[in-house]
Image (cartoon, rainbow, N blue to C red):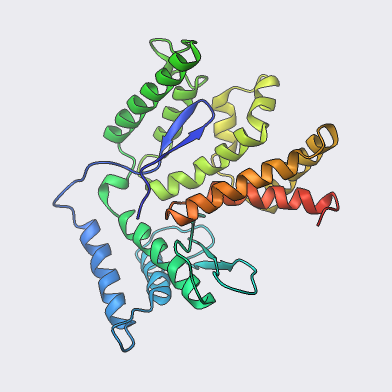
């Protein structure tokens, strides 16, 4: 199931599912038909569906239809090391979105199927026209972000929204609008991948450091628009956390415990979980480099 929660990113919130629907479109029907055909093809006795093969075929179908996929159509599985059940498995889709097994699994194979199932459901749902960034969606999402920002400001008793704040890329809501408008035509999963980068930059303190160097939000957004989360980015962020550990003993362990709890909650509720998973990856890398594991 697709999540309807909001992700806090900097000073604005990011809706992680679109509302509404656009009936009469053929895109969703084609996607559903493709999945149903795949289900029929990969059903092997006892009415069971090989959802792992169906998920892979779904993404291969997208590539054959001319969709550009970062790193190709391969779906990647990452089982969590464990010697006894319940077993856990994560699956990363082309472009970076990540899901995990969302129920207690008695076998590693069942954990893999559970992860594939939730990823397939989100992949199909992502084909719906309402999941694409359009002019109408930009206005709706920005209005929602402004409302959330105002609620936060009222709670803190600080009003920091000007009349044109949504059009100023140096404000939180304005930066959100700029990112949406720069990604028109993309789907929510594609946009979420970009948002994960900025969630990590905010969480890691990198955005604040850039602001302290007088970098505008628009400059930062343009710089990272084409970046991907790779080993180089993780290593750099891990170094930042090692520096914090030297100044504040135990900070990595405390942050890692929080990230692991968040990852577990997202996984069990069937949410997209790239952000908490990347936080865990970065913190574990930092933890290992200071000789704690």
Residue 13 coordinates in the image, percent (x, y): 44, 31
The quarter of the image holding the N terminus is bottom left
Residue 112 coordinates in the image, percent (x, y): 49, 71
Q: Compare residues 52 and 261 and report the one nearer the observer.
A: 261
Does 265 sit above or below residue 200? below
Q: Compare residues 77 and 66 and report the one nearer the observer.
A: 77
Does 211 sit above or below residue 269? above
Q: Is residue 184 visible?
A: yes
* Number of marks: 0
In the orientation shown, which residue stands out farthest toward the left? 24
Residue 267 coordinates in the image, percent (x, y): 49, 55
Left or right: residue 25 versus residue 233 is left
Left or right: residue 88 versus residue 113 is right
The quarter of the image holding the C terminus is bottom right
Q: Is residue 97 visible?
A: no
In the orientation shown, which residue stands out farthest toward the bottom? 45
Q: Compare residues 185 and 101 and report the one nearer the observer.
A: 101
Does 192 sit above or below residue 208? below
The residue depicted at 55 percent of the width and 33 percent of the height is 222
Q: Compare residues 122 and 135 and report the one nearer the observer.
A: 122
Residue 77 coordinates in the image, percent (x, y): 54, 68
Residue 76 sits in which quadrant?
A: bottom right
The residue depicted at 21 percent of the width and 45 percent of the height is 21
The residue depicted at 32 percent of the width and 45 percent of the height is 132
The residue depicted at 49 percent of the width and 67 percent of the height is 75
Does 122 sit above or below residue 43? above
Left or right: residue 221 versus residue 138 is right
Residue 249 sits in which quadrant?
A: top right
């Amino acid at each position: 199931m697709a999540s309807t929660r909001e992700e806090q990113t900097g000073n604005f919130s990011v809706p992680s599912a679109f509302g509404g629907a656009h009936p009469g479109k053929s895109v969703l029907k084609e996607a559903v038909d493709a999945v149903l055909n795949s289900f029929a093809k990969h059903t092997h006795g006892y009415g069971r569906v090989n959802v792992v093969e169906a998920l892979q075929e779904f993404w291969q179908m997208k590539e054959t239809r001319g969709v550009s996929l970062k790193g190709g159509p391969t779906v990647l599985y990452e089982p969590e090391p464990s010697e006894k059940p319940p077993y856990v498995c994560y699956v990363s889709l082309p472009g970076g979105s990540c899901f995990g097994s969302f129920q207690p699994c008695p076998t590693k194979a069942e954990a893999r199927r559970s992860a594939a199932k939730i990823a397939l459901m989100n992949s199909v749902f992502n084909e719906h026209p309402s999941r694409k960034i359009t002019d109408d969606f930009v206005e709706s999402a920005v209005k929602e972000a402004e409302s959330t920002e105002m609620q936060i400001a009222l709670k803190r008793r600080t009003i920091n929204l000007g009349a044109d704040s949504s059009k100023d890329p140096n404000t939180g809501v304005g930066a959100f609008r700029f990112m949406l408008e720069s990604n028109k035509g993309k789907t929510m999963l594609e946009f979420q991948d970009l948002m994960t980068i900025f969630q990590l930059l905010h969480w890691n303190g990198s955005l604040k450091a850039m602001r302290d160097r007088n970098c505008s939000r628009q400059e930062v957004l343009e710089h990272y628009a084409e970046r991907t989360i790779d080993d180089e980015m993780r290593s750099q962020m891990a170094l930042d956390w090692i520096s914090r550990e030297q100044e504040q003993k135990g900070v990595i362990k405390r942050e890692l415990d929080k990230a692991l709890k968040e990852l577990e909650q997202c996984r069990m509720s069937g949410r997209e979980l790239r952000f908490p998973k990347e936080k865990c990856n970065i913190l574990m890398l930092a933890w290992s480099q200071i000789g704690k594991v």
